[in-house]
Image (spheres, helix red, strand yellow):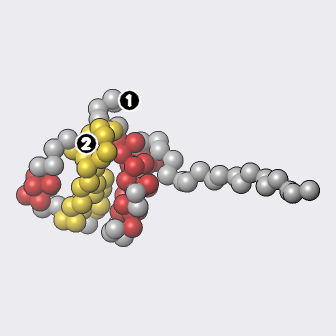
Amino acid sequence: MTTKTYKFAGISTLNGKTKIRFANDIMRIKVLDKNGHTDVNIKELPEAMLKGDAVKHLSSIGFASEVASTKPALERAANKYGVDLSTPKVEAEPVAQAS
């Protein structure tokens, strides 16, 4: 397991395949563009994060709703990095009855 952290994460599409991308420099966008990637959407993370944590963060901020192909890419990355993207179900506490 790697401990490398990243300051930026997002998606890009190359040859019809959308994938999650990680970077430590915003200039990564130019490199992706130069190499023929489309739909490049990279966000700055609130802090340096491991890949799994970055995927979880992107999911939590509604990143998947921006481009249709993003949700499957996030799900593949979550599976790859062992992250659960389901929202934990919070059970309501019983309300005390007034007597």
Measuring from the top left, give residue 13's x and y in whole percent. 24, 62
Q: Which residue is mark 2?
A: 7
Q: Is residue 35 visible?
A: no
Q: Quadrant of the C terminus?
A: bottom right
Reading the image, the residue beneath label 1 is 1
In this picture, is 57 found above or below 16? above
Q: Nearer the viewer, residue 50 or 35?
A: 50
Q: Residue at x 38, y 29 (%)?
A: 1
Type of the residue with mark 1? Met
Q: Position of residue 60 (x, y in %)?
A: 44, 54
Q: Position of residue 36 (x, y in %)?
A: 12, 61
Where residue 41 appears, as percent x and y from the top left, is: 24, 60
Let me know if residue 83 appears in the view.
Answer: yes
- Looking at the image, which residue is at 74% across and 51% down? 93
Q: Quadrant of residue 50?
A: top left
Q: Residue at x 36, y 60 (%)?
A: 63
Q: Nearer the viewer, residue 77 or 90?
A: 90
Question: Residue type at mark 2?
Answer: Lys
Q: Earlier in the sequence, mark 1 or mark 2?
A: 1
74 or 66: nearer the viewer: 66
Q: Residue furthest right?
A: 99
Picture layout, residue 9 above or below residue 50: below
**What is the distance, in whole Å, between disc 1 and disc 2 at their CAs?**
18 Å
